[in-house]
Image: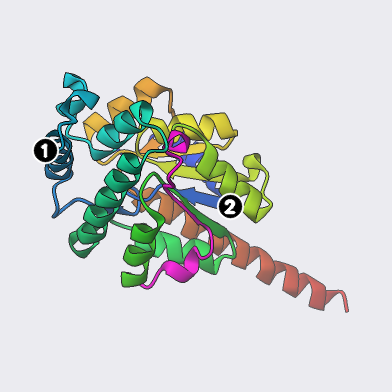
């Protein structure tokens, strides 16, 4: 997508300046989890696993062809809520996600953005539909886990609480004692936007391609970037302005002595 306009850049700066807490979705804004381990193949294998147990009828045709493992998992949960079948399917998906961390591709500028926000004293949390075990493994491999610990909120066995339900965002806000208006959610899907909207949290969309941008805009998101680079640039400018303000304040203080 094109570079932000002047108005969009100003809106971006304002949202960054106001934020005291940053809630990150994981797969997309921080990394492409399935960059080297096909999510489509994982979804197909879950469908085949169900079929091998005579449970092909638990999914309708759209769900069987969705090529999204989360669609398969949630469909089974709707029809067999709280069952051992759902628990086993969720564990199979978690194991595939754990394997995927070995070939996950870091999102450009995500690592320095995380480190810069942390250095500036902001608190960061993960609010994701992926397993928290997966998030911890990936962040540990990038030496980033300390930027988020203990605030990593991911998929539990209560699958009805996955985004677009705001449950994981509310868990993060409550644990951090943060008002929704002081937070900023970074996500790349309509479910991220809808969860942030329900939680009352300002939203910044990350769209790495035109399809992602179209889906976010159709959901109602208005603040969207195609790269995290302008976010990092705006944040570094904010940090510089703060440092200059502190220096001016320090000189003013000495002059009055």
Can see residue 104? no
Write down the region rendered in magenta.
143-163
Mark 2 or 1: in front is 1
Is residue 82 shown in magenta? no
The disc, 2 or 1, on the residue closer to the chain's N-terminal end is: 2
Residue 189, image x and y in percent? 35, 35
Q: Which element type, helix, strand or loop, lies under badge 2?
A: strand
Is residue 146 shown in magenta? yes
| Residue occupied by mark 2 | 21
Asked if 177 appears above or below 45 in the picture, the reply is: below
| Residue occupied by mark 1 | 52
**Main secondary structure type of the part rendered in magenta:** loop
Q: Which element type, helix, strand or loop, lies under badge 1?
A: helix
142 relative to 39 in the view: left or right: right
Dividing the picture into quarters, in which one does residue 191 lie?
top left
Tag shown at residue 132: none
* Residue placed most toward the observer, 89 or 248: 89
Dividing the picture into quarters, in which one does residue 176 lie?
bottom right
| Image quarter of the C terminus | bottom right
* Residue placed most toward the observer, 137 or 158: 158
At 69% from the left and 52% from the top, the residue drawn is: 177
Residue 252, image x and y in percent? 78, 70
Neighbourhood count class around disc 1 (C-alpha, 10 Å): few under 14, some 14–19, many 20 upward: few
Dividing the picture into quarters, in which one does residue 9 lie?
top left
Asked if 251 appears above or below 240 in the picture, the reply is: below
Asked if 246 appears above or below 40 in the picture, the reply is: below
């Amino acid at each position: 997508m094109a570079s932000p306009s002047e108005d969009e850049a100003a809106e971006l700066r304002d949202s960054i300046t106001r934020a005291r807490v940053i809630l990150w979705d994981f797969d997309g804004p921080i990394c492409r989890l399935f960059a080297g381990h096909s999510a489509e193949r994982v979804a197909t294998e879950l469908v085949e696993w169900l079929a091998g147990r005579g449970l092909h009828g638990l999914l309708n045709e759209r769900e069987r062809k969705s090529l999204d493992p989360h669609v398969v998992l949630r469909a089974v949960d709707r029809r067999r809520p709280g069952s051992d079948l759902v628990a086993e399917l969720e564990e199979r998906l978690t194991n595939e996600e754990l394997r995927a961390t070995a070939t996950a591709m870091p999102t450009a500028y995500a690592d320095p953005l995380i480190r810069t926000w942390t250095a500036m004293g902001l608190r960061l949390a993960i609010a994701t539909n992926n397993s928290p075990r997966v998030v911890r493994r990936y962040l540990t491999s990038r030496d980033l886990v300390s930027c988020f610990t203990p605030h990593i909120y991911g998929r539990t066995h209560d699958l009805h609480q996955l985004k677009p339900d705001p449950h994981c965002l509310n868990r993060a806000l409550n644990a951090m004692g943060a008002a929704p208006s002081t937070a900023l959610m970074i996500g790349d899907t309509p479910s991220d936007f809808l969860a942030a909207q329900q939680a009352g949290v300002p939203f910044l969309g990350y769209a790495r391609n035109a399809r992602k941008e179209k889906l976010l805009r159709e959901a109602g998101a208005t603040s969207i970037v195609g790269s995290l680079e302008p976010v990092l640039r705006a944040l570094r400018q904010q940090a510089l302005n703060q440092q200059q303000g502190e220096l001016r304040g320090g000189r003013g203080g000495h002059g009055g002595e």
